[in-house]
Image (spheres, grey):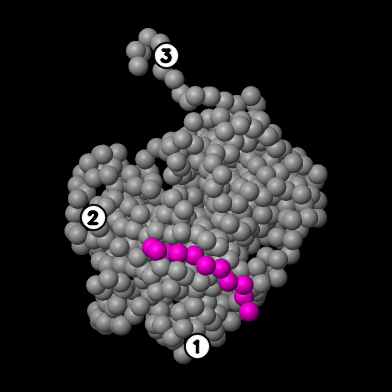
Amino acid sequence: MAERPVVLYDVAVVGAGPAGVAAAQAAAAQGRQVCLLDESFRPGGQIWRHRPAAAPPEAVRLLEALARSGAEVRSQVSVFDGWREDGAWRLAASGPGGRQDLAARALVLACGARELFAPFPGWTLPGVLGAGAGQALLKEGLALRGEPVLVAGSGPLLLPAAATARRHGARLLGVLEQAPWGSLLGMAPLLASRPGKALQALGLGWSILGAPYRPGWWVAEALGAERLEQVRITDGRNERLLPCRWLFCGFGLVPNLELARLLGCALDAGALAVDAAQLSSMPGVHGAGEVCGVAGVDAALAEGRIAGLAAVGAWDPAGPEGRRLLRARRRARAMGRELERIFALRPELAALPRPDTLLCRCEDVPFGAVDPAWGARETKLCTRAGMGPCQGRVCGPILARHFGHDPDTVRLPVKCVPVDQLIPPEAGSGPSCPPQAGC
Amino acid sequence: MAERCSITVDGQPLEAEPGASLAVVLLQSGRTHFRSSPSGQDRAPLCAMGTCYECLVRVDGRQVRACLEPVRDGMEVLTHG
């Protein structure tokens, strides 16, 4: 394969959700060379995962501005390595055409968040999927005409998932919110000070009208032979068995920190630590959106724009736009922290897995295989938990919750990649041993 | 009327909209089994955003996550990779 020179960009943005798109557009509109890298085949991230004809106006406006901005968009590439070299950041990514290398003076990490799973017996059955996953597949055209769907778990993402299911023709059995009514009352002052959000919540409530919304209920078990057929639900005292083909379960979100950790960025409370200009502890590495802590699309849009401008030295916090962005960020972050408190997971959920319930789905490791005396590294070495293709992205937060494990170290590659792509292009024939090693 | 293209899934022909998500097309065709786990369990998409790798299938010889793969005419898909 012919070697291509490594292009030096002013800014490379990783992740094309609202934060990444806002950052790339803001930096490119300043006349800088910007590259936006994303794993999906269409920019927009999870919240704007619609087919182009169905995208919301806010998404269309920003994506059109991105297209006009001159930023180069590389879709379907997974960034698996990053390091500092000759005063610039280097990234290596894997795509359908093979390895891609690039350099950038500044980085914006907008890697988003993934869904948090709280396992229960049967959670590996086909038909059980994340709440965000179900919503994404429906937005991309999955039609579940008349099929029974239950939405369960916790947090503000359950309602839009349920509304989307119903809009796409599913028979919505209801929404089970594990948080009790008492906690949900905390939403009232939050919504009262944010009329836009209150209207949105009302609209979502209206769109699932007729399907029960049950606070204080959760799924205790998913049952089925080849796929999901039934769910056992409970409020801790009563139990019911519901026939069901699809269970969309979401328990919150976890920031995607693997690349940030590989680059050496400091973390704070399970999120990328950034300053007022979205700059991390590493020179020239900015972060925006869920990677800095889960706070939703409003925070992502404001922080993406701040990070994009800051990455090219054009961020003015004292100007009218700067003040507006800082206000938007402050409000969205405050709301994110409040929601996290309201939707804290109840201890009963942690008691659901049985010894044979799988903890690591990639490697089929059951809960019973983990000795509670072990730390993260021993668990990994003794059971292979976290050593499959997802690299512990699903079971890592579960191990943290159930066994108090800190995440293990990250290293190259932070995404699965064909082995031939691990070799940097300048290495020619690949890594070689020193002569005295005798190999 | 949306444009259509033809793919094969485990040797069976399937009509799909070009550019649609392969995960959606496979689920829509009634398939809920994408990957086999090490102990032989059938698995289907969990996260649908490229994180969990439960939707891993083989497309024209390459292992791909079906949720991140757009459908192209003539694509040959093997499940249970």
Mark 1 or mark 3: name the one nearer the start of the chain: 1
Give the residue number, with chain letter if any, for mark 1.
A209
Q: From this viewpoint, is residue B36 visible?
A: yes
Depth order, front residue of A266/A186:
A266
Q: Is residue A392 above or below residue A120?
A: above
Q: Secondary structure at mark 3?
A: loop
Residue position marked by numbered label 2 in the rendering: B39
Q: Could you tell me which secondary element the residue under label 2 belongs to?
A: loop
Name which residue type carries label 2.
Ser
State left or right for residue A307 relative to residue A162. Answer: right
* Residue type marked 1: Leu
CA distance for labels 3 and 2: 41 Å
**Mark 3 — on which chain does it sit?**
A
Quadrant of the rendered structure where residue A416 is? top left
Q: Give coordinates of residue A8: x percent, y percent.
A: 69, 34
Q: Chain of mark 2?
A: B
Look at the numbered disc 1 and give the secondary structure of its residue.
loop
Work out which quarter of the rendered image holds the N terminus of chain A and state it.
top right
Q: Residue at x 19, y 59 (%)?
A: A356
Q: Which residues are magenta?
A: B1-11
* Residue A323 appears left or right of B71: right
Query: The C terminus of chain A appears in which quarter of the rendering?
Result: top left
Q: Label 2: how many residues lie within 10 Å, few (<14), some (14-19) or many (20+)?
A: few
Q: Residue at x 52, y 61 (%)?
A: B74
Q: Position of residue A174 (x, y in %)?
A: 41, 82
* Tag 3 residue: A434
> Same chain, marks 1 and 3?
yes
Q: Are marks 3 and 2 on the same chain?
A: no
Callout 1–callout 3 Cβ contact below 8 Å: no
Depth check: A6 or A291 in front? A6
Residue B4 in magenta?
A: yes
Q: Give the amino acid type for the residue marked by disc 3 in the picture.
A: Pro
